[in-house]
Amino acid sequence: MSKHSGALKELRAKGCRLTPQRLLILEAIAEGSAHMGVDEVFRRARESYPYLDVATVYRTLRLFRELGVVTEVGIADRLHFELTDPAARHHHMVCKVCGSAFDLSPYYLEQFRETLSREFGFEPDLGNFTVTGTCVRCGSRKELRGPIGN
Ligand SMILES: [Zn+2]
Ligand SMILES: [Zn+2]
């Protein structure tokens, strides 16, 4: 079974017309690296179909996101996409320095959700929760430079 067979099934069930271009774009996301930028999806899909234009990629990605088969991740000021895996739902940690995105298990946010619900009666929508910060690589690089002052 290919990585995106679940997504295909879902698209069909939702009545989405699976044009060759849409299939190519879905394949590009499924087979590419995690968290692909639009340009990356475009480059990969264009290898099989040189007439593809970037506007189609944008439109298709937006459609896929609305249908829930791809997830959008904001990294710096650019959007990235990945195939939605219902069995491995996760949030993201995005490094402000190098722009890498790391998956974060929902497990770590359960306490947070519970606290908001209990203390404030607030039900957070954490579906697209992304936290920004500094990753371990970039953090240790800063330390190597040594503390300022002292
Ligand atoms: Zn980093
Ligand atoms: Zn991810």
Image (cartoon, helix red, strand yellow):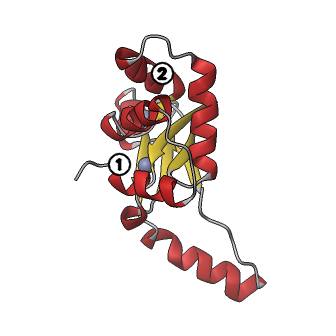
Q: Is mark 1 within 8 Å of ligand 2?
A: no
Residue farthest toward the bottom in the current orientation of the protein: 118
Pair 2/1: label in front? 1
Decide: few, some or many residues near mark 1? Use Cα within 10 Å; few <14, some 14-19, many ≥20.
many
Q: Is residue 117 left or right of residue 13?
A: right
Residue position for label 2: 42
Residue 29 showing in the rendered view: yes
Asked if disc 2 and disc 1 are in contact, CB closer than 8 Å, the reply is: no
Q: Please say if 66 is above or below 41.
A: below
Q: Could you say which is closer to the camera, residue 7 or residue 117?
A: 7
Residue position for label 1: 4
Residue 130 in the image, given as x and y percentages of width and height: 57, 52
Which amino acid lies under the numbered mark 1 shown in the image of this protein?
A: His
Which amino acid lies under the numbered mark 2 shown in the image of this protein?
A: Phe
Tell me the SS state at disc 1.
Answer: loop
Tell me the SS state at disc 2.
Answer: helix
